[in-house]
Image (spheres, rainbow, N blue to C red):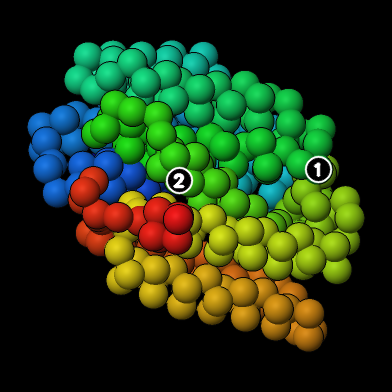
Amino acid sequence: MYEAIKKYILVTKPGIIFGNLVTAAAGFLLASKGRIDTAVLMVFLTGISLVIASGCVFNNCIDRKMDRKMDRTRHRVLAQGLMSPKAAVFYATLLGASGMVLLWSATNMLCAAIVLMGFAIYVVVYSLYLKRNSVYGALIGSLAGAAPPVAGYCAAGNRFDMGVLILLSIFTLWQMPHCYAIAIYRFKDYAAAGIPVLPVHRGMPATKKHIVAYILAFTAAALMLTVGGYTGYGYLAVAVAMSLSWLWMALAGFKRSDERVWAKKLFVFSILTIAVMSVMMAIDFKLPATSNLLLAFTP
């Protein structure tokens, strides 16, 4: 019984669910600006957890043959044949449908639509096609990863404003250096599975240049939350410190001979960066009446 329950938990990728819950809560709290509807927050987090779990199960089912070729993933439930594809599809459908019903009934149509769009991008566009066929698959797939904080923002505020676009930019741009660091660290795995990630397809020098470029773009996007009047100077200070530290680590990669060790450290720091910034944007918000830097310089 324990082993059966365990495999149904593991196939949902709990680590990915938890990481997305942190960013989803950050978006919700940012839009709430101190007026938190705890009941809606709890139902939202439950609903989006179920949808994310559904996407992960579908992804495991789709990638099961590919996963067997990679050291990192060959121990996954479906890769080992511990669950049938039919059972996985039924389980994923049940999770996703339950999550969407909760989101639709307890939040708003905008939030539910964003979550559904993120799910479709991850499962259909990315997992079924782009991951296997395009070197830029991660770029499109990153839109799915940005869906939780954007959905959280819309769940609390029920509005589509500049804050949505800024959050979308921050979390989309963050995922690119994060994914490239994984691809460098697990280069042999991706090459063995024939996945056309940038390091395999274009080489290490090009990938390192892309990492630096995306971190610079991420930094600019992160600062826009304060410039636009959504967060305070505490968030701004932390965002600058974390982004510049991440950039310094990325630039150091051009001089490192052991690229695998460097990439693993860069990957770990990317997680720390987004976690810290998510906390800061959740607690260092500005009230609507507070002026923003853009208006301050308007004649």
As drawn, the residue found furthest toward the right would be 202
Whole-percent x, y for residue 186 in the image: 69, 60
Give the left or right position of residue 111, taking residue 169 as reference. Answer: left
At label 2, counting other C-alpha atoms closer than 10 Å, the crowd grade (few under 14, some 14-19, many 20 or more) is many
Residue sitting at the far front: 299
Q: Position of residue 215 (x, y in %)?
A: 62, 64
Quadrant placement of the N terminus = top left
Observer-side mark, 1 or 2, equals 2
| Residue 22 in sight here | no
Image quadrant where residue 5 sits: top left
Question: Which residue has dot 2 on it?
Answer: 167
Question: Which residue corresponds to the image point at 24% horizontal and 22% vertical from the top-left?
Answer: 107
* Up/down of 86 relative to 117, above or below: above
In the figure, 29 relative to 227: above or below?
Answer: above
As drawn, 231 above or below 142: below
In depth, the one of 153 and 161 nearer the eye is: 161
Q: Which residue is painted at 57% across and 37% down in the image? A: 143
Q: Position of residue 251 (x, y in %)?
A: 71, 78
Q: Earlier in the sequence, mark 1 or mark 2?
A: 1
Q: CA distance from mark 1 to mark 2?
A: 24 Å
Q: The residue under label 1 is which amino acid type?
A: Val
Q: Is residue 266 left or right of residue 188?
A: left
- Which quarter of the picture shows residue 68? top right
Residue type marked 2: Leu
Indicate the secondary structure of the residue bearing disc 2.
helix
- Residue found 23% across the figure and 59% down from its top: 283
Please report the residue visible at 88 percent of the width from the left and 51 percent of the height from the top: 201
| Quadrant location, the C terminus | bottom left
Specify few, some or many for label 1: CA neighbours under 10 Å numbering under 14, 14-19, or 20 or more.
some
The residue that label 1 is drawn on is 135
